[in-house]
Image (spheres, helix red, strand yellow):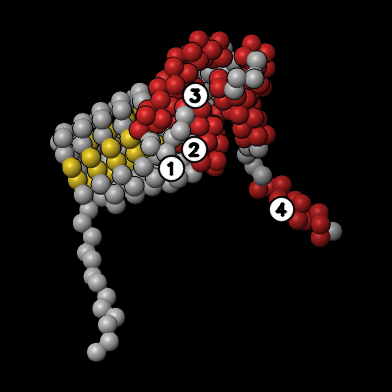
Amino acid sequence: MELQRIIDQIEVQKNLPNLNLSIKEKTEKFTRKLFHTLFDRQTPVGDNLMELGMDFEVLAKLVCWEPGSPCQDIWSDYLQLLPGILEKLNLDAQAIAQNDPAANSVEEVYLSYPGFYAIAIYRLSHELYKFGLPLVPRLMTECAHSTTGTDINPGAHIGNSFFIDHATGVVIGETAVIEDNVKIYQGVTLGALTVDKTLRNIKRHPTIEKNVTIYANATILGGETVIGENSIIGGNVWLTKSVPKNSMVSHTPQISIKNNSRK
């Protein structure tokens, strides 16, 4: 029978026993509930934390299929970190509100700024990443990525008072280091020089020191590339080498003026 032949061909290729799409759906639900628990004034914290604990237990059973992987025991330790994560996120929101003249209130930042949402999910996922929890941290940041257009790998190290303006198109790689009081704009990429699996345990992404501003569509690549503190990186700049502190780097376009005047 033709239908049975098609079914058999599909079944043969579905050969990953742990590929369960409900993991993604449950992680997205967990992420949204966690965000509401920390920020929404109307959400009961105690009740939601209990529900989140149960949701996490289900997730842990789904993703910890390899022997020796950390599982449910992570939750109690993670709970202890939530007040500190929230404190950092409040600093991020304040940095956005204080630096962006378009921000009318801190509440507006929490409710409407995609950059803040991306930072929030990054910080919440980063601690789970540090515990070694498989898959869930990456799915959390991908949830934010699909919503905001901002791709922050949960392995990145980001300091206090981080400001992403407009957010769309920002990419921050796994081994990137961003120190305190850094501002970046849309389209910025902090990436690797090459994509090679043998570089997995090597620092591949740049270090951005304190008080640096990086304007739209700048691309900074390489694990040895360091942008010195207090520097300004202009829009559309392409960097693969380090920049000393207090630098200003700009891209100067060639401008040709078309003359349409008639003789």
Image check: 109 left or right of 51?
Answer: left
**Mark found first going from the N terminus, 2 or 4:** 4
Instruction: Say which residue label 2 marks.
Output: 114
Instruction: Say which residue label 3 marks.
Output: 124
Q: Position of residue 19 (x, y in %)?
A: 63, 37
Residue at image point 44% right, 35% down? 103
**Mark found first going from the N terminus, 1 or 4:** 4
Instruction: Say which residue label 4 marks.
Output: 9
Q: Which quarter of the picture shows residue 98?
A: top left
Pick the residue in front: 262 or 28.
Answer: 262
Pick the residue in front: 201 or 137.
Answer: 137
In the picture shown, does residue 160 fall above or below 5? Answer: above
Crowd rating for badge 1 (residues with CA inside 10 Å; few <14, some 14–19, many 20+) = some
Q: Position of residue 241 (x, y in %)?
A: 19, 43
Disc 1 from disc 4: Cα separation: 46 Å
**Mark found first going from the N terminus, 1 or 2:** 2
Tell me the kind of residue under disc 3: Leu
